[in-house]
Amino acid sequence: MSTLIVISILAIVVLYLGLFKAKQALLPISVLGLVAALALAIMEWNSNAAPIFSGMMHFDNFAVAFSSICIITTILVFLLSKNYFEKISDNVAEYYTLILFALSGIIVMVSYHNLSMLFVGLEIMSVSLYILAGIKRKDFASNEAALKYFLMGAFSTGFLLFGIALIYGASKSFDLAVIAQYVIDRPTGIDPIFYVGLVLMIVGLCFKVGAAPFHFWTPDVYEGAPTLITAFMSTVVKIAGFAAFLRLFSICFAPLQDFWMPTLLVITILTLFVGNITALYQTNFKRMLAFSSISHAGYMLFAIVALGAASTNAIFIYAAAYAVSSITAFAVLMLVKAKTGSENFEDFNGLAKSNPFLAFALTVAMLSFAGIPLTAGFIGKFFVFNAALAQYHTWLVAIAVVNAIIGVFYYFKVIVAMYFKDNQTKQIATPAYFNFVLGVSLIITLVLGIYPSFITNLF
Amino acid sequence: MSAPVDYLPIIMQLLVALGFVALTMGITHLIGPKRKTTDVKLTAFESGIEVIGNARQPFSIKYFVVAILFVLFDVEVIFMYPWAVNFREFGLNGLIEMFIFMGTLLLGFIYVIKKKALEWD
Amino acid sequence: MELEFLIEKTALVLVLFVLTLTIAAYSTWAERKVAAWLQDRVGPNRAGPFGLLQPLADGGKMFFKEEIIPSGANKYLFIAGPSLALLVSFLGTAVIPFGQNIEIFGRVVPLQVTDINVGILYIFGVVSLGVYGIMIGGWASNNKYSLMGAIRGASQNISYEIAMGLSIIALLMVTNTLSFKEIAAQQHGWHWNVLYQPLGFLIFLICAFAETNRVPFDLPECETELIGGYQTEYSAFKMGAYMFAEYINMFVSSVVMAVLYFGGYNYPGMDAVNQALGPTWSPLIGVGVMFFKIIAFIFFFMWVRWTVPRFRYDQLMDLGWKVLIPLAIANIVITAIVIVGFDLFNKL
């Protein structure tokens, strides 16, 4: 609760700092503010908060955990942004502000207790992102990304709203608890429009998290947007989307699993194959990351398909692992791009010789993406598959394993390029902030991989 | 309290106005003189000089900025109507809450002015 | 819903309609007479005594003019523009109380077409529709002057609508209702709202000038720069419709200001008059007072037109956004603090 207030005020403060030409203060104040917000969020852990604002929001442990991970990832993104935005445009404060506004929307999204708040949070986040995607005003790809994102986003919001409206029509409430009670009270004879609303909401949410067959906007938007914004979108925003997805389904729709499970199952399998197979054919590293993010959305959908007590934990661990690896990948990509000017796999040639640390960090990130043991990604995949296995979706797990193996191919492409291909490139200068972020991500990835019980029993 | 029937007279007034407009537009069309007109007479008026191009071309972005700002601020103003009607019942607490809302609005307004979004030169 | 109700309302609507038309028509006459008076001329004096038949002659003339639709124009929108402007301008008066309840043949008749509890919102909605007429007509003409006039008109109207809305909010805080009937009744005697909301009235007045596109805010027409602005290409009654709409809007603005800020049909000493004349005749005095106020406002509109020069566009926008809106917000804050302060003080 106080987290949300702090972040909202922080956004306005940063905006005004920009207005009064205090550019040097932007980054420190943003990071400090976020650290404060993080502390306030963690302090609410296990406080057994009741729904606040007439049942609009509920800052339970679920909300605390997911807001914390979103805030931490945002801090990492901010640390990478040193000198990045200045190069793109003069209006630096607006970047920070928009990211912070998006984050405040995300906090609402992970802590809503009322469908109207889900909508409000989603819109605060999306509208900020539409602008962020197109913030390189003179860049054609960025403009295209923004427009595509906006059109698709508006379209999907329409689906979501229709869904919310129909569910409201059946259950006569926006409140999650009331809707859940409505479902429980009627083992048979739920109004048919409730089911239609449920399907529409699945469509809307799948759009937002970029699951196939609603993923078409993802690659272009991720490629066109500024790299740092892509990093933000593919980590924080995706996690928030899944948190909202999971919150809705675990609170409201769990008893109806027989109805929505097949639909979601098809979407999951489709997402996995589309993401992985298309990623295999990419030559552009950023585009590969975009498709890999689709495939990771597939893995996370797994935990929702096999909805159960362990799902929250599984998604949380997977999201954490995925976020830190993504941040590493994007950080290295930014450095490489600044050096070579493009984002293809060849640009990574010989990185192991010129910058061993960068190469090592990226390798660990890729291994984590691929789900190799001793990395956080393995633990994430393990928990997600475990959740599925617990419900006897054995063949589903088999499909997922096949996909994980496909994934190994394209993740190793980068590693091969870095270690086994030669190129006379000079050393890339890594700013201290980057080293810090990479180091932190590396440590988190390895620690979670080796000693996962930190966060495996949170819920 | 208003009942739906209270809105009926508005529809009556609308019908009367609609009838008047349709009637006058019809009459002026029927009794006005009709002449064979040349193409030149039907061109757009540009102070007697030959018409150059089409009028339907892009115009200054400033107008769009004003329109967007209008949408923003007008929505906020609409939020204040229900409050203004009932604000005595809300007392001091309601007042403080509304001042926070208006303060946020004002911050946005100052931002807009500082960013020179409303400069016309 | 009985028959009497329908007859009563139909009669009221028709009377109001004829009244609106008459006032709009004679406003054109009055405008020329006032202009003449202010400039030490005679003004129209040929048609009838004092030129009183001039509006009829003008109106008749319009029907006999050739109807021209430019070849580049969008025909349907070209006709829709003035029609919409005229249509919308008629609707505003529906919620205005022109007097106290009057007793005719033993039946109590409210001198108001209808009393809805969102009267102010209704008027605002209807008035802001007026800009569509200008926009559509100006764009459909396919003339650069028209387009300029239309865009200016639209952005001017929306800019001043914010300040107008904000000034009304301060008024609502005093009245605590959106119904015109109650607002009028609250100002019994001399308790006119203008005494409590002088600043709000001033802002509202300025905005009313801008919303009706009157000098000094007549940039959408602006005959010295834009020929005729959005109505450049119009002829015959379509041009007349725009002109009528403008004068009707002026009438509606005057009515709204008279009711909201100047007590409507209320006047000092009305209780004594009510006692003396009874429920049939005394409301008519109120109606007379109301129309006196309305005509005074219309005269004020004209007076300003022939006195003040036109604003430049940037000045217009600066006045709207940087002066009126902050002033209106300050007015709300002061009003709120004063009222809540008094309430708290009374509780002590």
Image (cartoon, coloured by chain):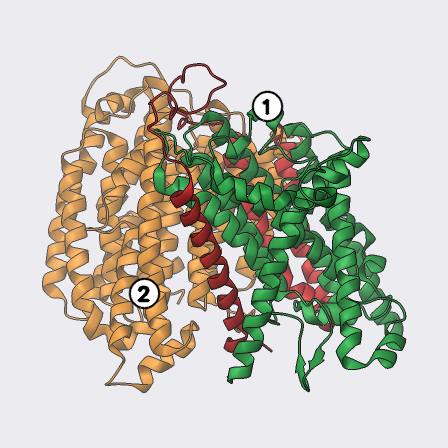
For residue A170, say whether it is visible. yes
Measured in 3D between alpha carbons, the distance from the residue under mark 1 to the one under mark 2, in whole angstroms, is: 53 Å
Discs 1 and 2 lie in a common subunit: no
Residue at 28 percent across and 25 percent down: it is A343
Label drawn at residue A163: 2
Chain painted orange: A
Q: Could you tell me which chain the residue with mark 2 belongs to?
A: A
Q: Residues within 10 Å of mark 2 (few under 14, many from 20)?
A: many
Chain painted red: B
Residue at 46 percent across and 48 percent down: it is C83
Position of A120 relative to A413 (above/below): below
Residue A302 appears left or right of A326: left
Q: Please provide percent x and percent y for residue B116.
A: 62, 30
Name the foreground residue: C61 vs B72.
Answer: C61
* Chain C tint in image: green
Q: Please provide percent x and percent y for residue A180.
A: 36, 77
Which structural element holds mark 2? helix
Instruction: Give the residue pinned by disc 1.
Output: C225
Q: Quadrant of residue C9?
A: bottom right
Name the foreground residue: A371 vs A143.
Answer: A143
Residue type indicated by callout 1: Glu
The quadrant in which the C terminus of chain A is found is bottom left
Label drawn at residue A316: none
Q: Could you tell me which chain the residue with mark 1 belongs to?
A: C
Position of A159 relative to C243 (above/below): below
Residue C216 appears left or right of C11: right
The quadrant in which the N terminus of chain A is found is bottom right
Residue type indicated by callout 2: Gly
Residue at 41 percent across and 73 percent down: it is A176
Name the foreground residue: C311 vs A140.
Answer: C311
